[in-house]
Image (cartoon, grey):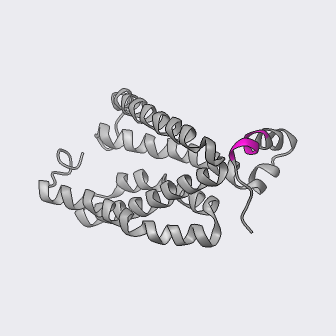
């Protein structure tokens, strides 16, 4: 998309993508301090709720500066999500089970990436945004990430699912019991 449709040079392409990686690298210590102070749940939720905005911003960003800003925002959001998720799992899983659970998580992530690429390829032929199949896939990705982020919000914020009544609370209590750690004081 960046090279073909926006006609960025290879150098500009590298700067755009590199800015996101650099932002993620620089944001990790800041999010680590936030985890120490507030706990992993809030950092994970912050990252999860910001991630749907990244592909949405990609849909409107056209200039190299806007693309770099989008990548910086994405790098900071991914840093929060990844570091929050890792610490969240460390808090939630007994030490003797961590290796197994984290291995399964990494395998599941690999499968999800593979399936996501296949799904993106199938979605590409179904529509266009402003004459671009790539923008269509990015827009669908933004919508799907919103759904997942809202699911995270209901699992991570007790008041969100408690307000829905007894059935979601029973489901959330079942999901929470083995996976979610208690809140830090």
Q: Closer to the camera, 173 or 64?
A: 173
Q: Closer to the camera, 161 or 91?
A: 91
The dominant secondary structure in magenta is: helix
Residue 175 within the segment the image draws in magenta: yes
The N terminus: image quadrant: top left
x then y, percent, for residue 84: 55, 58
x then y, percent, for residue 58: 35, 53
Kindly identify the residue that appears in the image at 76 percent across and 54 percent down: 158
- Quick check: 11 left or right of 132? left
**Visible in this render: residue 142?**
yes
Image quadrant of residue 79?
bottom left
- Quick check: 65 left or right of 107? left
Q: Closer to the camera, 43 or 137?
A: 43
x then y, percent, for residue 10: 13, 54
**Visible in this render: residue 9?**
no
Image quadrant of residue 41?
bottom right
x then y, percent, for residue 131: 28, 40
**Farthest residue in the front direction?**
96
**Farthest residue in the right direction?**
166
The C terminus: image quadrant: bottom right
Kindly identify the residue that appears in the image at 52 percent across and 39 percent down: 105
Residue 170 within the segment the image draws in magenta: no
Kindly identify the residue that appears in the image at 42 percent across and 35 percent down: 110
Q: Magenta segment, which residues?
A: 174-179
Kindly identify the residue that appears in the image at 50 percent across and 61 percent down: 80
**Residue 31 vertical placement versus 45 (above, below):** below
């Amino acid at each position: 998309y960046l090279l073909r449709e926006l006609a960025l040079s290879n150098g500009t392409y590298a700067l755009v993508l590199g800015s996101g990686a650099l932002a993620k690298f620089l944001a990790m210590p800041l999010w680590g301090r936030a985890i120490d102070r507030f706990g992993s749940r809030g950092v994970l939720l912050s990252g999860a709720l910001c991630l749907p905005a990244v592909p949405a911003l990609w849909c409107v960003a056209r200039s190299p500066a806007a693309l770099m800003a989008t990548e910086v925002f994405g790098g900071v959001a991914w840093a929060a999500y990844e570091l929050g998720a890792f610490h969240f799992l460390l808090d939630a899983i007994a030490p003797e089970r961590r290796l197994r659970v984290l291995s399964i998580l990494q395998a599941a992530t690999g499968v999800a990436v593979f399936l996501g690429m296949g799904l993106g390829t199938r979605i590409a032929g179904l529509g266009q945004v402003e004459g671009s199949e790539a923008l269509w896939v990015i827009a669908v990705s933004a919508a799907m990430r919103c759904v997942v982020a809202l699911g995270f919000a209901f699992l991570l914020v007790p008041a969100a699912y408690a307000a829905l009544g007894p059935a979601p609370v029973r489901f959330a209590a079942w999901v929470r019991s083995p996976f979610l750690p208690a809140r830090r004081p």
